[in-house]
Image (tube, helix red, strand yellow):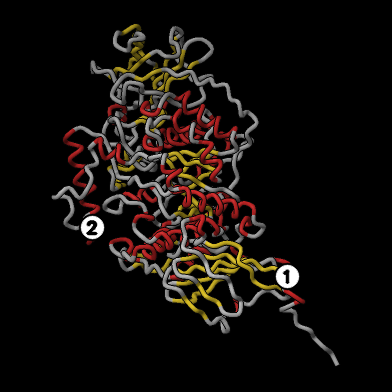
Amino acid sequence: MCDASVQGRRYPVGAELQERGASFRIWSPACQRVELVLLDSDGQSERHVAPMERQADGYYSVFIDTARAGDFYGFSLDEHRQLYPDPASRFQPRGVHSPSQIVDPAFDWQAADWRGVRLKGQALYELHLGTFTPQGTWGAAAERLGHLRDVGVTLIEIMPIADFNGEFGWGYDGVAWFAPSRLYGTPHDAKAFIDQAHQMGMGVILDVVYNHFGASGNYTGVYSPFYVSQRHPTEWGAALNYDGEHAGPVRELVVANAAYWIDEFRFDGLRLDATQAIYDDSPRHLLADLSTAVRTAAGERSVLLFAENESQQVCHIEPVEAGGFGLDGLWNDDFHHACRVAATGHAEFYYADYAGSPQEILSALRRGYLYQGQYAPRQKRRRGSPTRGKQAAQFVHYLQNHDQIANSGRALRVHDLTSAGRYRALTALLLLGPQTPMLFMGQEFGASAPFNYFADHDVELAQLVREGRWGYIRRFPRTAKWGDKGELADPGARETFEASKLDWSECERHAPILRLHGDLLRLRREDAIFSQQDWSMLDGAVVGTEALLLRWEAPEGDDRMICANLGRDLEWRTVSEPLTAPPRGKQWRLLWSSELFEYGGAGTPEFDPENWILPGHTAIVLEAIDGPDGAGRSRCRTE
């Protein structure tokens, strides 16, 4: 054993291999004595016990020159004989209640020249590793990367991987924040997946949870009572202590964790879960520190930071120097909710804030958030903030995500809750709109698998989770009495988890919907107008009770128009709507339709610019082309 030291460390806590041996450091201000216990390779027998040196601010540190990669270890606190895992463990191969393992971070990166990702032009794809493939591993997921690339995905978003208790779960109850879950493979496997994605030209970002700890396997409390806030509760338990007594090391832990995923694993960014529950009354918000640290960790690589924020506060995407948090994008539930009501007609519980009208969809595409500070009667408060001056690409739009599918009672996907035609039309609005689009795994081929909420806990906690989940679903009047007859899936049942796995043979059986997504993403990527993601070019009008049009006004008259009709066929008199007038010297031509035979559609009538018919449950795309004999040109004559 050598003198305890923090020299040569990359992160403030955890076990780190050094030139010879390993350095161990934890934060445990409430303890008077802390010992490192190094175990034999079997992870059972004690090989070496070493007292740790107390340092400033309640940290303990020790260096062990005999420690090697693969060794198991834990900590003994004061007079307790129990061995506790490291709260900053890099790997928990035997579960979160077992000893931690030293990890060698070295990896032979093949895509060493990868420069990262930038906001414009991204097509996001959210996936859960455990249900993305039958095997539920990094290796199996890597075998599907070619499929994602061919569809047109550019940026993969992995649901949380910080290790959690149990054999299956969504990951939002993580407790070992530095340890990729052993359920999906090793840290090396995670890096191999990211490296392979980079070689194929796709980025990978990670969903992280910094608003609460999971309820089972969280040992931070035995090290310090100051990890959690005494003032700020969340709906999932106590918030983290970012602004109270001894908050400094907690902030340091989280900022270091964010940088760790970017630096050591080369993730291309993060998605921050439920930031409205990251409470911080400090002069400088934690998220400002986090965004700065992440970009420093990325070095010359470009990374992206997205947030889910129910309060819809655009300060998240404003520069740190201007008082913002310095993130890149925000999820926009407003677009999803408006489209969901339009697709299903169901406007209950939180959907009651939306009419599903063409005006809502139009406004979301032109302005991002629908709630920008006006009073929301259901919530009895003002909600949102203005999006003026922001870019369309800074708002992430979707028709499906993990939460919204699971909240449908039977956890059905939107295409199972509406007509095929309506769904194709809404998909066109999603994928050709100026915002950053996101698909949820399997959406591209019309997956039939539900996506239930699932979490593997012991009996007592499992019952609490089941009651809480079912209680939430019962807040929808349609499902208020569900559960007694087996209508609701049990979150703790393994069959609920298994039922949520994708059936990849459906790619062939559902080829038309897969073709639709691929063609739309190609049009988005290659079209000179749609690819600009410039909502300053975009205007629109409501033209029927369920119909709208969007017009992109481009230089040289290279305009585009989308006409989306979610209702019945509409024979429409366009005379009084100026947006239907073609640019001077141009005429409209049908470029694309959601009702093509190749997409499983019912067909589209010939487009007649003199007698507009907007087919029902359809989206059509028009392009402005040169008119015959200069049609549309006006001649001015001076006397």
Secondary structure under the numbered disc 2 in the rendered image: loop
Residue at 49% in and 31% down = 142
Q: Earlier in the sequence, mark 1 or mark 2?
A: 2
Question: Which part of the image, by quadrant, shows the N terminus?
Answer: top left
Q: Which mark is residue 626?
A: 1
Residue at 39% in and 67% down = 356
Q: Which mark is residue 475?
A: 2
For the question of whether residue 627 can be seen, the reply is: yes
As shown in the figure, which amino acid type bears the numbered disc 1?
Answer: Asp
Whether 237 is drawn above or below 352: the answer is above
Q: Where residue 503 sits: x, y (%)? A: 38, 40
Secondary structure under the numbered disc 1 in the rendered image: strand
Q: Where residue 333 sits: x, y (%)? A: 41, 57
- Relative to the observer, which residue lies in front, 364 or 294? 364
Whether pointer 1 and pointer 2 mark residues with C-beta atoms closer than 8 Å, the reply is no
Q: Is residue 416 left or right of residue 615?
A: left
- Relative to the observer, which residue lies in front, 460 or 381? 460
Q: Where residue 273 sits: x, y (%)? A: 40, 45
